Image (cartoon, rainbow, N blue to C red):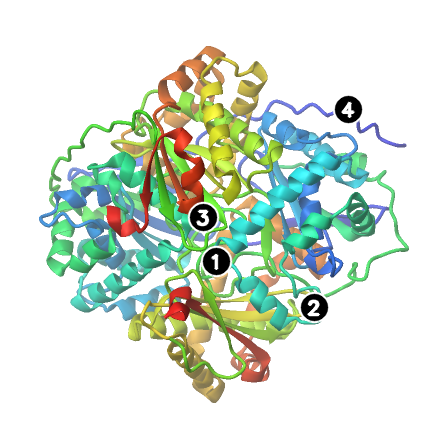
């Protein structure tokens, strides 16, 4: 299962990736910039994400609101997300609309024309997004509470959406300064995937992108040449957080649900750090005592019914050998009902309502996370003890060869399922091309996992899954506090 | 040479979209089989759909909500030969993905695996369809899980708003209940209720199977016939629904959500069932109204007013009855302003001011995005299974594009007038009830729900 890929650079430094994929007569235009929330000035958190929103409120030749209107009128659709390390924009169109898509996308390089009023409205929209995603959502503060403890000294320590105070303070000057630093061809990638002809596509790309002035000489700190990077994909285990597909296995509704096609959950999943989508998707249900919490663990009271324990281990940057070893381990831990964590905590002990682990890969350092939503009457430390026992057993040599084989099989099937989707394929190509240096790495991903053996996993786990290298958050129902 | 970017390129005429080829057959015992062959990826899946779901819970002896859902969930949790743990080991070892569940109208089981393991996986899922063990131990475990899940859903304002809306609109209809049941009903479900549901509804005449991916029609038919060809057809009992009536005048339900910093609004009225003859016109009308990012409702509430991250309207069709709703989350102090704007949009679209450009945009948007919905063979299978479940003609999608493009402004206006009832709304809001009580009176009589147990 290989994707056909052509990669090259334009003279202004823009990286181009083309992928012809048989199937429906549609194309994806996906451009991304190597700057994400970690590049926010510390007193302007949320700026990267805010700019992602502003990008749709007017550029030199496409006035406010027209972007989506033009796209809809031509049978297309768009969305965008901001991650810790990069920001990605994508649109879909019938393949006959390729030139239109390139025209729309390339206008991103011409600068903002948003006025005060657009700025004000987008601030309100983003503030509502923050309320919806974090403040009014059960367990919605996990990202903030974990990030500031995991990465106290770099730009991963704040929420992608930023703080309300900072969002309110953004000025045109802030926006323009960031834009000029990061939104330039040498810091960007353009991926075109789907029903394309290479020659025609290349000519059109040159037409719309080649005259964009390069601004080389001031390559940003995280510019090209950086081998490490940021994963893409979705939060495994619960199948949410994905660019497309709801994984809910629903045959009713709008008929897009896919009983078996879109179910994710190989436990190796990679959140690509965190991602915030520009447009609200379909709403999803959030499925989600303790007087003996160990020192160093945090207790947070929230408006929730089920206690939950979130464990985060700091691990090396994405793309490293250790990172792949721990992704296999994460799959061993939680992919499928027979996995270590699901089997013990859900099946054998009846402790957990839901449990999953995932690796969030980022270029300045990643983390492996275990999220355990306990049943109402299970104490988080009780569940925590079981989880620790499982990890100890693995560290003490209890890991079986068949478990590793199983994990790799899971990862393989899920990877193929994902690449069936042209949007997911484009997303991966963009990620590998922009962050890891080469889009064709998308075809070498399976080999990376196959190369991991038992001692790689053990050595890496011993090094990083240590109690003094983790953050533990115990979320408790607010009513426990009141008693 | 510097390009003149002020000129928008013209998009060419999109290629015609043909619904992918599929094979269809029906066995003597009533089993319907679809095969969607596509060798592009080394994956094959099998999907089983029984045309009864949670709305048929009322046809069981104890009428316990959640019976269908629990029955479907338990299919994968042990057969006569293998325990739940053994099954999970086999599935996971082969890297396969399995899921089962029930919604209002259907129960399903599906597996997706690498094609080289498919026959083995198919054998295994067939043993589940033909006779799960439904052991007491697994039933108790599943009950505990569902009860805890139902408890946690209440932490989510969106769930509360939707749940109250559904209960108030559907009243005594089987669609009023949560598919998974209530904490109380689930606690009462016993093994005999599950085996009763299984025996009555998991019969060949009620079964649709789709084999999808790297498999030929000949082989698929042979595999299915070998397992299911000799079974007796069986017959499922009929179901009746009470007539659904809208609130008239509109009514407001305010549900307390602890610590809410937003109001979750879920407002609407009765809708359509899937085989409604105006389905396509309604789809286009709703795309203009609130079914897409550039729709009137999202434009108004998000882009013009900055009230929300996103607002949408949808016709939630089911087999026998459906509803229409607008969903949006907004900060507390603008709850009533947001509802006012929603009602304004529902009224406006009925009074003949949809422009030609809006209609054209909606038509192009739907037809342009249609191929993305047919991208994977499993997505195609979902569409076919739905048509079969809801009793819609199989050539629906062959006529879909031309039907969309033939709609006129008059059709949209008439459809809006007929299917939107802005003066008969059931308005459900989860949030700070004290604050919302002050501002929401203008829309209708208010009922405050302090705890959702009051209405379950």
In the foreground, A458 or A348: A348
Give the chain letter at badge 4.
Answer: B
Q: Secondary structure at mark 3?
A: loop
Q: CA distance from mark 4 to mark 2?
A: 42 Å
A47 relative position to B203: left or right = right
Q: Looking at the image, can residue A327 be seen?
A: no
| Residue underneath mark 1 | A414
Secondary structure beneath label 4: loop
Instruction: Find out whether the residues at labels 2 and 1 contact each other: C-beta distance under 8 Å.
Output: no
Q: Residues within 10 Å of mark 1 (few under 14, many from 20)?
A: many
Q: Chain of mark 1?
A: A
Question: In whole angstroms, how far apart are the C-alphas of marks 3 and 1?
Answer: 14 Å
Label 3 sits on residue: A246
Could you tell me which residue is drawn at 56 percent across and 78 percent down? A470
Q: Earlier in the sequence, mark 3 or mark 2?
A: 3
**Above/below status of A460 relative to B153:** below
Task: Name the residue furthest bottom.
Answer: A396
Q: Nearer the viewer, residue B450 or B149?
A: B450
Point out residue B42 in the picture as x, y percentages from the top left corner. 46, 53
B210 to the left or right of B400 = left
Labels 1 and 4 share a subunit = no
Q: Are marks 4 and 3 in contact (CB under 8 Å)?
A: no
The N terminus of chain A sits in image quarter: bottom right
Q: Chain of mark 3?
A: A
């Amino acid at each position: 299962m290989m994707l056909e890929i052509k990669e090259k650079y334009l003279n202004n430094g823009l990286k181009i990736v083309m992928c012809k994929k048989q199937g429906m007569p549609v194309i994806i235009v996906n451009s991304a910039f190597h700057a994400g929330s970690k590049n926010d000035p510390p007193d302007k958190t949320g700026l990267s994400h805010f700019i992602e929103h502003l990008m749709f409120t007017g550029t030199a030749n496409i006035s406010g609101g027209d972007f989506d209107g033009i796209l809809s009128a031509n049978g297309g659709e768009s969305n965008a997300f901001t991650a810790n390390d990069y920001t990605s924009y994508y649109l879909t169109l019938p393949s006959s609309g390729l030139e239109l898509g390139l025209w729309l996308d390339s206008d991103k390089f011409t600068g903002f024309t948003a006025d005060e009023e657009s700025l004000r409205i987008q601030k309100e929209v983003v503030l509502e997004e923050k309320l919806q995603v974090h403040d009014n959502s059960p367990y919605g503060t996990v990202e903030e509470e974990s990030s500031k403890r995991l990465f106290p000294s770099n730009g991963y320590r704040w929420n992608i959406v930023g703080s309300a105070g900072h969002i309110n303070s953004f000025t045109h000057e802030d926006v323009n300064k960031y834009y000029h630093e990061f939104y330039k061809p040498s810091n960007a990638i353009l991926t075109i995937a789907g029903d394309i002809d290479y020659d025609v596509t290349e000519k059109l790309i040159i037409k719309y992108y080649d005259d964009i002035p390069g601004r080389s000489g001031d390559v940003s700190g995280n510019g090209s040449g950086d081998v490490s990077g940021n994963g893409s994909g979705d939060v495994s285990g619960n199948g949410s957080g994905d660019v497309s597909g709801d994984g809910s296995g629903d045959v009713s509704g709008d008929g897009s649900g896919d009983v078996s096609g879109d179910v994710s959950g190989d436990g190796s999943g990679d959140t690509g750090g965190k991602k915030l989508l520009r447009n609200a998707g379909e709403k999803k249900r959030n499925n989600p005592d303790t007087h003996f919490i160990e020192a160093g663990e945090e207790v947070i009271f929230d408006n929730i019914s089920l206690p939950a324990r979130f464990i985060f281990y700091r691990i090396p940057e994405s793309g490293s050998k250790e990172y792949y070893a721990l992704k296999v381990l994460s799959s061993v831990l939680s992919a499928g009902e027979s996995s270590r964590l699901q089997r013990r905590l859900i099946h054998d002990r009846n402790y957990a309502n839901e449990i999953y682990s995932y690796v969030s890969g980022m270029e300045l350092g990643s983390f492996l996370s275990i999220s355990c939503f306990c049943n109402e009457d299970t104490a988080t430390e009780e569940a925590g003890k079981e989880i620790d026992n499982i990890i100890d057993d693995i560290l003490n040599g209890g890991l079986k060869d068949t478990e590793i084989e199983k994990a790799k099989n899971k990862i393989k099937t899920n990877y193929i399922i994902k690449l069936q989707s042209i949007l997911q394929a484009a997303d991966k190509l963009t990620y590998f091309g922009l962050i890891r240096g080469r889009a064709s790495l998308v075809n070498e991903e399976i080999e990376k996992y196959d190369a991991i053996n038992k001692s790689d996993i053990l050595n890496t786990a011993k090094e990083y899954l240590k109690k003094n290298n983790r953050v533990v958050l115990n979320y408790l129902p607010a009513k426990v506090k009141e008693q | 040479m510097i390009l003149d970017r002020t000129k928008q390129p013209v998009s060419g005429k999109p290629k015609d979209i043909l619904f992918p080829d599929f094979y269809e057959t029906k066995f003597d015992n009533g089993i319907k089989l679809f095969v969607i062959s596509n060798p592009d990826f080394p994956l094959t899946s099998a999907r089983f759909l029984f045309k009864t779901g949670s709305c048929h819970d009322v046809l069981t002896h104890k009428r316990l909500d959640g019976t269908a859902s629990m029955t479907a969930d338990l299919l994968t949790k042990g057969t006569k030969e293998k325990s739940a743990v053994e099954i999970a080991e086999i599935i996971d070892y082969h890297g396969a993905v399995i899921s089962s569940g029930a919604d209002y109208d259907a129960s399903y089981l599906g597996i997706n695996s690498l094609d080289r393991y498919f026959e083995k996986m198919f054998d295994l899922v067939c043993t589940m369809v033909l006779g799960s063990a439904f052991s007491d131990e697994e039933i108790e475990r599943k009950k505990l899980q569902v009860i805890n899940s139902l408890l946690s859903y209440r932490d989510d304002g969106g769930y509360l708003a939707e749940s109250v809306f559904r209960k108030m609109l559907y009243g005594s209809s089987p669609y009023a209940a949560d598919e998974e049941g209530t904490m109380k009903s689930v606690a009462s479900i016993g093994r005999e209720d599950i085996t009763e549901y299984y025996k009555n509804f998991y019969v060949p005449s009620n079964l649709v199977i789709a084999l999808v991916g790297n498999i030929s029609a000949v082989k698929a038919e042979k595999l299915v016939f070998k397992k299911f060809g000799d079974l007796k057809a069986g017959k499922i009992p009929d179901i009746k629904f009470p007539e659904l009536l809208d609130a008239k005048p509109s009514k407001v339900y305010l549900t307390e959500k602890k610590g809410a910093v937003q109001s979750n609004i879920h407002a609407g009225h009765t809708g359509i069932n899937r085989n409604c003859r105006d389905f396509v016109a309604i789809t286009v009308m709703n795309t203009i109204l609130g079914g897409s990012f550039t729709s009137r409702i999202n434009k108004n509430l998000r882009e013009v007013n900055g009230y929300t991250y996103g607002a949408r309207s949808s016709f939630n069709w089911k087999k026998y009855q459906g509803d229409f709703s607008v969903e949006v989350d907004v900060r507390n102090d603008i709850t009533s302003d947001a509802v006012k704007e929603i009602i304004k949009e529902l009224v406006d679209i009925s009074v003949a001011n949809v422009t030609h450009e809006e209609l054209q945009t909606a038509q192009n948007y739907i037809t342009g995005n249609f191929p993305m919905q047919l991208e994977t063979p499993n997505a195609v299978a979902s569409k076919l299974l739905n048509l079969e479940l809801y009793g819609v003609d199989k050539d629906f999608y062959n006529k879909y594009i031309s039907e969309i493009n033939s709609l006129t402004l008059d059709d949209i206006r008439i459809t809006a007038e007929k299917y939107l009832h802005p003066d008969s709304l059931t308005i459900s809001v989860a949030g700070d009830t004290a604050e919302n009580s002050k501002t929401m009176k203008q829309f209708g009589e208010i009922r405050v729900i302090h705890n959702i147990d009051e209405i379950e």
